[in-house]
Image: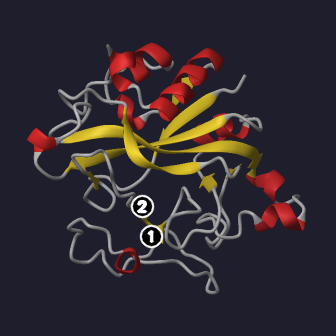
Amino acid sequence: MPRAIAINVAANTNLPGVRGPVYPDGTFVYVPIPERKPTLPVATVPTYADLDPPVELPSDAMDRPVHLDPEFATYPYCESYTYGDDHAVKAGPLSTLDPGDWLLFYATLDFHGEYDEAEPYLSPDWGVYLIGAFEVAFAVTGEEYETLSTVDRERFANNAHVKRDPFDAKVLVAGTPNSRLFDRVVPLSSPAAGADANELVTRLSNDSGRGPWWRRRLWFDDDATATLLDLLDSRAFDDFFG
């Protein structure tokens, strides 16, 4: 049975200073963080102006290149499903993911629109939401990446960490074609407040939901992962949350 790990990604109030939007029907826009390190001269790295996200960015941000990671094949300037990380605290657990496990991505998003028209699981201010998922094809450490076959290395050619100069990934994860950027969010916070974890966190994951849980990685064992995957497919939130 597969396991799952969920990690925080995407724009936030620190980088670049705004969160991505979520709308009354649960649709959203994935806005990446800015790229903060040098990239290879030959690398093509889009800017915020290229992506033109529907948020008011700081005036000096539009021409900044973005750190487009995770990479979703259906998103502009992306080619495949890849994720890289240069932080050892996350790289260790992620490198243990096996084929068929799941890597889930969540983001803090600001509500945009008329709240009286909103889905009941949305917070009126900001909330924490799953925005995408990889079914893991394989995961490798940075050292293992250097020994991959040309074909396997090519899968990561468009990943933001591979484009950095120097290459700095401590882990790289490739997703199968079953991976996806969601059409609509899946809530991890309660409708009352973004800081309040719902039962997907407190009941299914290893996390207590206390403190800034939305900055931590969340672990789901095989039973919890099966429940979570069913919920992602059915979106039967009323049945789960009661």
Where residue 28 sits in the image (x, y, percent)?
33, 53
Q: Quadrant of the N terminus?
A: top right
Q: Nearer the viewer, residue 120 or 14?
A: 120
- Which one is earlier in the sequence, the residue at label 2 or at label 1? 2
**Residue at numbered disc 2:** 32
Instruction: Give the class, few, some or many, for how many residues have Cα within 10 Å of label 1's Cα (few <14, many ≥20).
Output: many
The residue drawn where x is 49% and y is 71% is: 76
Checking the image for residue 100, the label placed there is none
**Residue at numbered disc 1:** 66
Label 1 is placed on what type of residue?
Answer: Val
Farthest residue, direction bottom: 42
Check whether the beta carbons of the residues at disc 2 and disc 1 lie within 8 A of each other. yes
Whether residue 105 sits left or right of residue 83 in the image: it is left
Whether residue 33 sits left or right of residue 194 in the image: it is right
The residue drawn where x is 24% and y is 65% is: 55
Label 2 is placed on what type of residue?
Answer: Pro
